[in-house]
Every structure is written in structure tokens, then in C-alpha cells.
Amino acid sequence: MSKHSNNPQGSLQAILDQIARNSPEKIAVTYGNKQFTYYELNEASSRFADALVNYGVEKGDRVALFLQNSPQFVIAYFGVLKAGAVVTAINPLHMEREVEHQLCDSGAQTIVVLDSLYPIVEKISVRTQLKNIIITGLEGIDLKPSDIKTRLNVFNFRDLIKKTTGKSFGLQLKPNEDLAVLQYTGGTEGIPKGVMLTHTNLVSNALIFASWIKGTSEDVFLVALPLFHVYGMTTSMIVPVSLGAEMVLLPKFSPAKSLQAIEQCRATVFCGSPTMYAMLLASSELEKYDLTSARVCISGASPLAPQIQKRFMQITGCFLVEGYGLTEASPVTHCNPVDMTSGAVKVGSIGLSLPGTEARIVDLETGHKGLAVGERGELAVRGLQVMRGYWQNPDKTAQVLCDGWLLTGDIAYMDSDGYFYIVGRKKDLIKYKDYSVYPRELEDVLYEHPAVKLCAVVGKPDALFGEVPKAFVVLKEGAKITNEELSKFVNGKVASYKVIGEVEFCKELPSSLAGKVLIRLLKEDL
């Protein structure tokens, strides 16, 4: 079994090069009925790098990837890095205004775009710095440049790779300083910020996480998380590449297709979100498939309700643990142990800080005073994975970085065993009169009710009390319950100042492709 690189100071592309040399015939990517070996992946990415350089891409330039999960994403990602450029990945759900902001803010002059998303790029290109557009199709049926009338250079992704040689450029990198990725946050404050992640940030995080989950080259990673999101990018792409393991790519998450892929490909590792696990639990297909190959499942992106965690393990027999991270930390900082025999998993906890990662709880007012065990404050982290800062935004950078410590914006506490617990986001804290109400506490109680499939609690403005908790709830198929019954169920389990003032039933909750409920969209409708 091949071992992953143990050099956190190396570059991302060097990891791929090493695996391709050591295990060239090992399957790297499975996508439908297509498979690519590590030799083929490495060769294609080198050829793509050659093409980028031929068309003017230089070291430090930003290259945008506007793609769904696909072999093209992986090839383009490593090709951009081999050219010495910086990846800025765009959410394929983004609309014109959002895509334009990211392209203009990053200064990207080259974009790799899915054919179905090209019309967005075509409309906004005149207002950006774009010079090159490279088009690809999920099914391998790429648009021909002659089909498109544009003022820009337009290329066919597949043709570029065929026409180049994949020569080596003798690129000189400083992994601790040179950016690998310019990753844009979800825009919780209205305007997305570019997070500057170096090669060392991402490599160190991937190697530590790979070791934490006891990964080997024999593992098979089910990749349903979107690769444009840093959670999927690190845990479901960089980690398996560092191990020389297989990635089974799904274009997007589907409960039925995910369950089918686990059985057919004998997937051993699955990183997902609480929403994904809730949807798997609610799927009528759940008991039809053999999931025994999955030795560990990780939940991240948002808090995992204890009820979902317990039920998933009981019903599937899969070992599900919660972890934690954020874009600014590449992203993983905490995770529960994955050893099924240790009994060390604490339901409701994000686990221990990863090796090489320091974590502490600080006061909410200044962010400098350390708090004692059990006290609630803001979680701060420090380690090799912490970003260099926000792109062209020194003021915002100074607000969250101090002496290498990153203020996460999450309210948490640590127990006497060193396990951490997330209580809620500072910005999502509900202020009822003079009391602080944490949405997660109410959401955990809601998930205890057998009729609840998905839920989210937000603070609704109130002239008398300041804010009152409002619950948005998606019921399981066929379930029936009234607002009053569900409110009574929750309010009988919490203090009087925490009671839910209103319940709204929904067909679905707005969420990102990573499965994170978009609280800001719920608040906009209050």
C-alpha cells in the first residue's frame, strides 16, 4: 500500500506527481462508467498546464473553475497549480451578479466553464478581465469554439489537452507563501471575501486529516460534496490524492445515487453534511443497499444533530463522527476519533483539535482573554492550515487574525477531556430580552421528534422582546403534525425564555451544494 507524502511544506502538484510515479496504474477517478489512473490524471493535468502557459497564464495569475464535480475539475485544478497559477472555484449555482463579483474581485483572466454555464460567462465577460474561456461538457461533448461568437479566445478543453505535450516548466514555488487557492466565502455579511490559502495551508491540512481518519491507498472515497467548496476540495479530493486512493465522483449529491455508489464501488470513506445524512435517513432506498464497506463517515459544514448521528449509526451500522472547520482554516480544525473500538466519540461534540492545531475559547468582547473549561466564548484556532488573510482586505483580515490566532465566529466551549462543542454562530445568536438563545439547542430538540426531517431556527425581530425564536421545519414524507403540537414538544424541554414563538412548515430549506442551510436567506423573509 502506498503512503501519502509526509511533507507539509511541499506543493499540491508535487503530491500528485509523486503518487503518479509510485502508483501509475492505480485508479484515481471513477466517474460513471469511466475510470482514470493516476498516470492519466497526472498526464492530463500537465498537458492542461502547458496549454495555460501557452496562452499567457503566468505564476500567481488566478484561473477560475466554474464546474460541477467531474474529472475535468480535478484535471483543471492540478493543471492550474502546475502552471504556477491560483485556483478560484465558483459555485455552479451562482447567478450572473455573483459570478461577475468573483471574477472581478479575483482578477481572473482565464476561466474553465461547463458548457451549460457558458451563457452566464458570455453575458458578463465584457465587464470582467477575462481573456480566455475554456469550455467543457460533463458527458464529454464539448462545445466547439466555432459555435460561439465572442470577442475572447474560446477553447475546447479536450482539444487543448490533446494538442499539448505536458512539458515540465521548472516552476519555483515557496509553498508557505505562494497561493494555491483563492476561495470565496459564502458571503454571510453580504459580500463574499476571497480567502488566501497557500500550498502549505492545504497540504498540511490534507495530510493531517488523512492520518486522522487512518487513510490508506486502499480506501475508496465517495465524492458527493461539491469540489468547488473547500470542505469537499480538501477532504474528498486532496486527501485521497495524497493517499493514492480512489475517488468516486458524483456530479451532485443524490441519496439514491450515493447509496448505490457505496455498494457498487465498495466506498470506505464518505464526507458529507448533516443535511446529506438527514436526507439519507429519510430515503426509501436506505435499506436496499449494502453499506458495510463504509468504515467511517464524517459530518461537517454545519452542526450535526445528535439524533441524526445516533439514528444513522443504528440504522446503517456505519460509523459517523462529527468534525469542524471553516474556509479560513483550509478547512478542518477538529474531528472526533474514528476508531470504532475506542469508544471515544462524544455525540454532540466536534471532537478534539487535530494534531498541530491549537484551539482555545476566548471572551466574546475582546477575543483575547482565554476562558476556563466549560465556559462559553468564541473558538479561536492556530496552525499551519490558517489562511494568509482575506484577498485585498487588510481591515477584515485584522478583525479575525491576531498573532496567528484565527477567530472563527463560532461560540463554543471545551470540556475537561479536551473535546469541543459548538453552541452557535455569534451572528446567529438570538437575543430574547436580556437572554442569549442558541439556535442549535432548539434544533437538536426539534430533531428528536420523529416527524422532523430538516429544521433551522432563527431569531425573528420582535418589538417587545427584541427577537423570538422561529423554526423552519421540513417534515418527513407522510408525517403530520400541527404547529401547536410541535411547539409544545420543544417548549416542554427548554427554559421559558427559549420557547419557540413560531413554526413554519416548508417543502425544503434553502441550502448550499455542500448541504449547509443558508440561514441568511431564511432571515431575509422574516
Image (tube, grey):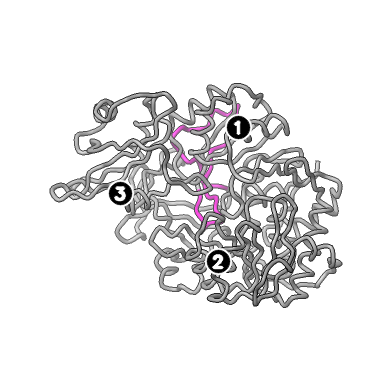
Badge 2 local density, few (<14 within 10 Å), some, or many (20+)?
A: many
Start and end of the magenta stretch?
325-354
The amino acid sitting under disc 1 is: Ala
Q: What residue is pinned by disc 3?
A: 429
Badge 3 local density, few (<14 within 10 Å), some, or many (20+)?
A: many
Q: Please state the horizontal and vertical placement of residue 89, each as a whole percent of the image.
A: 59, 60
Q: Please state the horizontal and vertical placement of residue 18, each as a whole percent of the image.
A: 80, 56
Q: Quadrant of residue 265?
A: top right
SS for callout 2: strand
Closer to the chain start, of discs 3 and 2, is: 2
Q: Does 517 sit above or below residue 281? A: below
Front residue (pair 466, 70): 70
| Disc 3 to disc 2, C-alpha distance | 28 Å
Q: What residue is pinned by disc 1?
A: 256
Q: Which secondary structure type mostly characterizes the magenta part of the structure?
A: loop
In the picture, the disc for residue 165 is none
Q: Quadrant of residue 217?
A: top right
Instruction: State which mark lies toward you, 3 or 1.
Output: 1
Front residue (pair 299, 131): 131
Is residue 491 within the magenta segment? no
Is residue 328 within the magenta segment? yes
SS for callout 3: loop
